[in-house]
Image (spheres, rainbow, N blue to C red):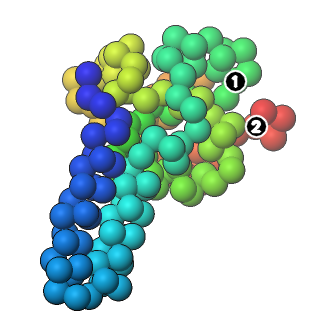
Amino acid sequence: MKRPWTLPTLLVLCGLVAATAPFRTGAPVAGAAVVAAFAVLSALNSPLLYPRSISASEAVQRSGTDGRPIVYWRPGCAYCLRLRLRLGRGARRLHWVDIWRDPDGAAVVRAANGGDETVPIVVVSGRPYVNPDPAWVRDQLSPSA
């Protein structure tokens, strides 16, 4: 199982390594800018930006009860990040499943994609949609949810 913090940690370490040259040559502002840029990239690729992930079985159970869509995602996915940012506060109304933390969620994604782990997948009423338009996903959220 892959770790969700591997990419953000590597980005921070790369930023620190890349910033050593400007600091050594007497350009602390440039070094700080490099560190800041890598810190932002790290934050954008971390699980902290997403609502709390739940297991696939719990998401299916909750979705059956409240009718909200399920999003299968993974850290470091640009399309997942796009979906998350474009949904804004509405993202908290969805059930999020991190496929790197939940093998059952990864199995659902592979079943929907013919063996590939292409994400995000949004499941609405039991039907999976691969990388749907965020506006469409927003429309799927009922006002009462």
Q: Tags 2 and 1 in contact by the CB under 8 Å rule?
A: yes
- Quarter in which the C terminus is drawn: top right
Kindly tell me whether residue 21 is visible in this rendering: yes
Amino acid on which disc 2 is placed: Ser
Q: Position of residue 77 (x, y in %)?
A: 34, 46
Measured along the vertical axis of the image, is residue 96 above or below residue 16? Answer: above
Q: Residue furthest bottom?
A: 26
Residue 92 position within the rendered picture, expressed as x and y whole percent measured from the top left: 66, 40
Q: In this picture, is 12 found above or below 138?
A: below
Of 11 and 123, nearer the camera is: 11
Question: Quick one: label 2 or label 1, which is nearer the N terminus?
Answer: 1
Which label sits on residue 44?
none
Residue lying at 17% horizontally and 80% vertically, measured from the top left: 24
Check disc 1 and report its element: helix, strand or loop: loop
Q: Is residue 113 visible?
A: no
Q: Residue at x 30, y 31 (%)?
A: 3
Rendered position, 140 above or below 127 = below
Residue 126 position by quadrant: top right
Give x and y (percent) for residue 33: 35, 78
Which residue is painted at 53% across and 29% down in the image?
A: 53
Side of 104 relative to 16 (left or right):
right
The amino acid marked with disc number 1 is Gly
Q: Position of residue 44 (x, y in %)?
A: 43, 55
For disc 2, the neighbor class at 10 Å (few under 14, some 14 to 19, many from 20) is few
Q: Is residue 122 above or below residue 79?
A: above
Residue wearing tag 1 = 67
Q: CA distance from mark 2 to mark 1?
A: 8 Å
Q: Which residue is mark 2?
A: 142
Farthest residue to the right: give it: 144
Dot 2 falls on a residue whose secondary structure is loop
| Other-residue count near label 1 (Cα within 10 Å), few / some / many at <14 / 14–19 / ≥20 | some
